Amino acid sequence: MRQPIIAGNWKMNNTIADTKVLLADLIPLVKGAKAECIVCVPYTNIQTAGELIKGTNIKLGAENVHWADKGAFTGEISADMLLELGVEYVIIGHSERRQFFGETDETVNKRSITCLAKGLKPIICVGESLEERQSGAYTAILEAQTEKALVGIDKSELGNLVIAYEPIWAIGTGVTATNQEANDTIAIIRNKIASLYCRNCADNVVRIQYGGSMNPKNVADLMAMPEIDGGLIGGASLNASDFSKVVKY
Ligand code: PGA
């Protein structure tokens, strides 16, 4: 079945010194968690974080990756560079990248394909704006984002990727989608995957997280919803106590 998966997204936070303190606190707190536990950290902290979490139940993630093997792409990082440091998961197409750094459905697809070809597991983010939610357009938008992200990805790879449903209006705002809204919207994404691949793939293979102000207070109720397989956690992942409570909901 679908193992719960909780990933921290540190975004542009934490120096190496901060990383050492946070992980030293976090490691004992998440020990024995039933959920798969991941920290996605800035590139500069990957090596330090990787060394610190070796032998623990915390897995290493990055926040982006380029699709090319190597070359003249100033400021970008390749899959091989991440693999060399022990990275397992990579966040792809976070709404902040779509909003501020020109990420498109096409580049999300290219990055995801490269991840899977290289043996990295993409956490592919989809989500609608407040306007799109209120107008009712969100269903079509999420279906299109999901379909475009998965172009050219074989059914056999579905267990190696994760989808994160993150309504943009709930990210970093303190506003969470209601449990029912999050659940029902994830069902829309799951049904799209069923139509693209197969019902069994959607129901038993692909894991779909909710992201957007998930925290120690709301995690248990969100995780009790049948469609929600985990969380992508921003703000609450920067505090060891809060993040461990989410991981051990
Ligand atoms: P948040 O961020 O938990 O701070 O809302 C989630 C995310 O952007 O991944």
Image (spheres, rainbow, N blue to C red):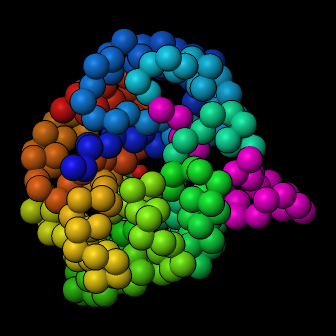
Residue nearer the viewer, 69 or 175: 69
Q: Main secondary structure of the magenta part?
A: loop
x, y percent for residue 109: 56, 73
Residue nearer the viewer, 179 or 114: 114
Residue at x-position 68% and y-position 42%: 82
Residue at x-position 68% and y-position 28%: 47
Instruction: Examine the rendering and report whether any part of residue 72 can be seen.
Output: yes
| Vertical relation: 241 (above or below) 80 | above
| Vertical relation: 205 (above or below) 146 | above
Q: Quadrant of residue 165?
A: bottom left
x, y percent for residue 99: 53, 69
Q: Quadrant of residue 17?
A: top right
Q: How many marks?
A: 0
| Range covered by the magenta-colored residues | 59-80
- 87 vs 75, left or right, is left
- 194 vs 237, left or right, is left
Instruction: Examine the rendering and report whether any part of residue 94 can be seen.
Output: no
Q: Is residue 64 magenta?
A: yes
x, y percent for residue 20: 57, 16
- 35 vs 79, left or right, is left
Residue at x-position 21% and y-position 49%: 1
Question: Farthest residue in the right direction?
Answer: 72
Residue at x-position 52% and y-position 46%: 89
Residue nearer the viewer, 156 or 41: 156
Q: Is residue 215 magenta?
A: no
Quadrant in the picture for the C terminus: top left
| Vertical relation: 151 (above or below) 61 | below
x, y percent for residue 77: 74, 51
- 83 vs 157, left or right, is right
